[in-house]
Amino acid sequence: MQLRHVINLHKGSTALLIGALMLAYGNGSVGAWVYLALHGGYGMLWLLKDGMFPDRQWQQPIGWPMALAGFLTLALYWLAPWLLIRSGAVPPPPLIAAAIALNLLGTFLHFGSDAQKHFTLAARPGLICDGFFRYSRNPNYLGEMLIYASFALLAMHGLPWLVLAGFWLGVFLPNMRRKDESLARHPEFAAWKARTGLLLPKLIG
């Protein structure tokens, strides 16, 4: 078993879980349907991405104990739809619009930069300093953070934000720092680092 199988199972079953929650709580509100479209749609796009331009870091083999622990950890992302659908609250239109805009921008950054990385490295190994990576060294992480921020926004509850903070500080940030350490072997890295941000584009300097 590979780590990607655990991730794919979680992402692929998200739409089914949200649909089941809507049926269980009798919630067919606009907010619930928008949430299903955004979070469920993201899961489907992830599966397409894994089939078309997979990320090698998720192809590492793991045992069943780690697989179970990983799935349960990822299941924390389902707290947002459960809170929203259980509450019956309907997000106001401006909040829905903001969530959709965040989701669109995040999807563009996440999948676009992952595609660029995959196909560029397949053609020529080395440091990627242009395109999505011209201003940020981790546009894919930035995109994923915006996507999940849109889900937390729709949930209208503080707990999903705590979950995201745990993932961002405990997983994303260490991964980005390890990536910098690995890429530092390239001669162009110092100049690229000086003109880019770790996550957000560097506006000064």
Image (cartoon, rainbow, N blue to C red):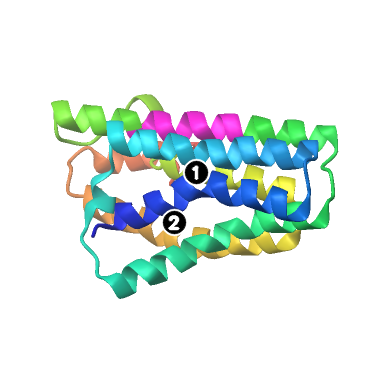
Q: Which residue is mark 2?
A: 172
Say whether residue 111 is magenta: yes
The total number of labels drawn is 2
| Of 52 and 116, the residue lying toward us | 52
Q: Disc 2 marks which amino acid?
A: Phe
The label nearer to you, 2 versus 1, is 1
Q: In the rendered view, does 190 fall on the left or right side of 85?
A: left
- State whether the magenta stretch is mostly helix, strand or loop: helix
Residue 69 x/y as whole percent:
40, 71
Residue 195 x/y as whole percent:
40, 36
Q: In the rendered view, does 111 fall on the left or right side of 150?
A: left
Magenta-highlighted residues: 103-114
| Of 2 and 148, the residue lying toward us | 2
Whether label 2 touches label 1, CB < 8 Å: yes
Residue placed at 30% from the left, 58% from the top?
3
Q: Residues within 10 Å of mark 1 (few under 14, many from 20)?
A: many
- Mark sitting earlier along the chain (2/1): 1
Mark 2, secondary structure of its residue: helix
| Of 124 and 45, the residue lying toward us | 45
| In the rendered image, the vertical position of residue 64 relative to residue 204, given as above or below | below
Between the residue at mark 2 and the residue at mark 1, the CA separation in whole angstroms equals 10 Å
Residue furthest to the bottom in view is 65
Q: Residues within 10 Å of mark 2 (few under 14, many from 20)?
A: some
Query: Quarter of the image containing the N terminus?
Result: bottom left
Residue placed at 38% from the left, 39% from the top?
47
Residue 116 x/y as whole percent:
31, 28
Say whether residue 34 is magenta: no
Q: Disc 1 marks which amino acid?
A: Glu
Mark 1, secondary structure of its residue: helix
Residue placed at 28% from the left, 43% from the top?
55
Q: Using the rendered image of the protein, determine whether residue 200 is visible from the camera's viewpoint.
A: no
Q: Which residue is mark 1?
A: 144
